[in-house]
Amino acid sequence: AGALLGGSASFQGSHGRAYLFNSVVNVGCGPAEQRLLLTGLHSVADIFCQSCKTTLGWKYEQAFESSQKYKEGKFIIEMSHMVKENGWD
């Protein structure tokens, strides 16, 4: 996992709430494609668990809206793919 950047309700994944991370580990990255998301057009690549190959979310490769540029190079992981450990809400 990486440093948590947003509030728990700040980001929306394909299947519910998600977190934005600076970096991730044990994750593979698929090819980039353009997708129209809630916040506009982005170039994103699906990310998946290196072990089980489950799709976890995506990596922002490029944001086309200037207000969304801060997401470039960062990762969305959906809460449904996280396991809660002690020490975070």
Image: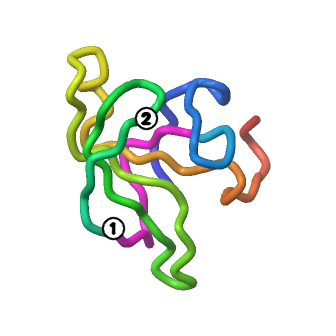
**23 magenta-colored:** yes
Give the camera-side residue of 87 and 82: 82
Residue with the mark numbered 1: 29
Q: Report helix, strand or loop for mark 1.
A: strand
The structure residue drawn at horizontal position 48% and vertical position 38%, both measured from the top left corner, is 20
Q: Which residue is mark 2?
A: 37
Magenta stretch in the rendered image: 19-28
Task: Give the residue furthest to the top.
Answer: 67
Q: Quadrant of residue 64?
A: top left
Residue 53: image location, x then y, percent: 51, 80
Q: Residue at x 24, y 26 (%)?
A: 69
35 vs 81: above or below: above
Whether residue 89 sits left or right of residue 37 in the image: it is right
Amino acid type at image mark 1: Cys
Magenta stretch: residue 72 in it?
no
Against 17, residue 31 (above or below) is below
